[in-house]
Image (cartoon, rainbow, N blue to C red):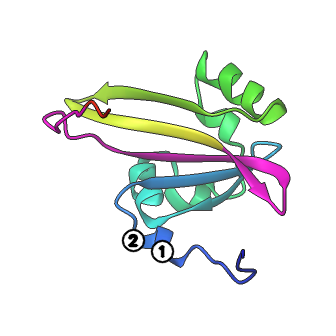
Amino acid sequence: MMQNNWNVDWAEEFNGAITVCDRKGIIVYMNRRSIEQFHKYGGADLLGSNLLDCHPEPSKTKLKEMLEKPVDNMYTTEKDGVTKIIYQTPWYQEGMFRGVIEISFQLDTSMPHFFRK
């Protein structure tokens, strides 16, 4: 059974950036880590702005496509010696597609990789 009173309090202390935009690309939520990660671009002031404006090509086109047709997108990126995993996924509310959630966090490059049977 699904809870109707679910909230995002847990996300504030999540050790990764969580950014949510609506179907038009408007940023509607940033957790504490997301605000910190994007401080040089405006931090909390990015709330209410368009996420598409924050992405260069070809990322902008990919995000536009995701806002039109909900699909997952996952990749790794490296900047200044830090590797991150980026997971973008559709946001649904009561079964309706509402936008995109982006979760990013630092990847420990020495983490083990297991093959399961």
- Name the residue rendered at 30%, 34% in the picture: 116
Q: Secondary structure at mark 1?
A: helix
> In x, y percent, where is residue 95?
84, 56
- Name the residue rendered at 72%, 43% in the picture: 50
State the extent of the magenta-drawn residues as a range: 90-114
Residue 10 is marked as 1
Q: Secondary structure at mark 2?
A: helix
> In x, y percent, where is residue 71?
70, 32
Mark 2 Cα shell of 10 Å, populated few (<14), some (14-19), many (≥20)? few
> In x, y percent, where is residue 112?
16, 37
Q: Vertical placement of 18 versus 65: above or below?
A: below
Q: Residue furthest top?
A: 58
Numbered disc total? 2
- Name the residue rendered at 42%, 47% in the picture: 40
Between the residue at mark 2 and the residue at mark 1, the CA separation in whole angstroms equals 6 Å
Residue 15 vs residue 43, the one in the foreground: 15
Q: Amino acid at mark 2?
A: Glu
- Name the residue rendered at 70%, 79% in the picture: 3
Queried whether the magenta region covers residue 9, the answer comes back as no
Residue 44 lies in quadrant: bottom right
**Residue identifier under label 2:** 13
